[in-house]
Image (spheres, rainbow, N blue to C red):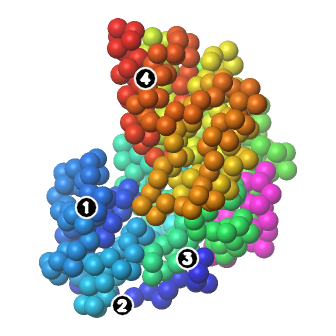
Amino acid sequence: MTADKPRDFPSLPEHIERIHIIGICGTAMGSLAAMLKERGFEVRGSDAMAYPPMSTWLEARGIDIMRGYDRSNLDWNPDVVIVGNVSRATYADAVVTRERNIPYLSLPEALRHFFFEQRRPLVLTGTHGKTTTTGMLAWILTDQGLDPGFMVGGITGNFGSNYRLGHGDIFVIEGDEYDTAYFDKVPKFWHYAPFRATINNLEFDHADIYESVEDIEHVFRRFCDLIPDQGSLWVNGDDARALAVSAHREDVRRTFGLGAHNDLRADNLRFEEGRTRATVISGSKMLGELDMAMLGDFNVRNALGATALAMDEGLSFEQVADALSRFKSVRRRQEHIAHVAGIDIYDDFAHHPTAVGATLGAMRRQFPDRRIWAIFEAKSNTSRRRVFQDDYPPAFALADRVILSRPWKKDDDLPEEMRVDIADIAESIRRLGPTTELIEEVDAIVAHVALQAEPGDLIVGLSGAAFGGLHHKLAAALRERFGE
């Protein structure tokens, strides 16, 4: 990070009607645009990547999109400009924003100004699981009548959306430690004024922003400072770094996890028929049983974090458990895509080696006798880098068949010495046991797997992006092969 604190909040017009968004076709920025439109503002935006599905999704909501980043984009004279972190200071519409002295905000500044006022922000953070935990908490509070607003980094199964305005006095937000904007180089979650928060875990990530895990520890430690004395902070007590960065806030901190030392813990975990069951204990008191349609120890921890904040907001464990029993996971988190001729296809967002290992571990525990295919794409800014070169192979060890695709190339592609060596990773995985192949193109992967998969196989596509439509292409190819 290059800044010690967020910039001073700019002066805005007393009356705002028109808002322009630079980088409007990003997932979060598009959602913000729709939220502002729903609030009654006139919203337009610009983006060089104005393609379906986001472009058509925005147009269906009456939001005009200008292709590219031209100076003329602002000729409609907006009152405020919101700038996504895709935007560089040199983009023409960013330049003209400054030349014309139009007030401009980042996404987190806009969220706080337009949607957090007079509300209690509940902020869910951590390297892994924050999207799922945010979706869980938003569903629990909504299902039990508290009518929160929320914004989450994925499409929630219960709502079919990644945002909701709500009318209650709570706003649930996924807290991201990625940087804010070219003019405000601090973590997004420093802007969110958390009243309550969780830290699910803490590992090195975002190698394009942070040089070391110590840098990430620093921004989380500062995040903990933002929680008021009357608020609450729940951290994963099984995670040493989460405990370390929050140690100075023992006045508001409590712990959740699977270990007996945690203030809120789960015991007697059972995984069967696509569901997870566990006994939840607070201190020495048994609260009851948790039963949800998700797999893995990590999702039990996610549920405990959501449970803790929901109970701090006044709900009983019985209310929380009732809601979680009907929780539908966020899309692309162990999402079941298709069942064809006895073959199941799943889509999972995992791209960090810890997440890959956790997902495959959960699948192996639930389906010990099935052949598991793991198909992986290195597309995120971190996964394309060499930083996890030695960590990926053991993450794939529980799979039977592994296919690695060509790492994604961007316009600002990395120097050779910084890129992940995917061929070396493939060879290291082979030495651990799984049959491993390096197939560069998505269509070639589809053709290969569709020919070799057999009834009883379980196929997991792992990527931080859409993976070129792999999952649905594979389902179609399997239907054609088996005549379904």
Residue 458, relative to residue 191: is it above or below?
above
The residue pinned by badge 2 equals 11
The first of marks 2 and 3 along the sequence is: 2
Magenta residues?
225-249
**Residue in view at x 56 percent, y 12 percent:** 456
Q: How far apart are the two marked residues, 1 and 2, measured between alpha carbons?
A: 24 Å
Q: How far apart are the two marked residues, 1 and 3, measured between alpha carbons?
A: 28 Å
Q: How far apart are the two marked residues, 4 and 1, measured between alpha carbons?
A: 44 Å
Whether pointer 2 and pointer 4 mark residues with C-beta atoms closer than 8 Å, the reply is: no
Give the quadrant of residue 229.
Answer: bottom right
The first of marks 1 and 3 along the sequence is: 1
Please tell me whether mark 2 sits on a helix, a strand or a loop.
loop
- Name the disc covering residue 186, or none: 3
The answer, for residue 468, to whether it is visible in the render is yes
Residue 372, relative to residue 255: is it above or below?
above
The residue pinned by badge 1 equals 38
The answer, for residue 16, to whether it is visible in the render is no
The first of marks 3 and 4 along the sequence is: 3
Q: Position of residue 173 (x, y in %)?
A: 49, 60
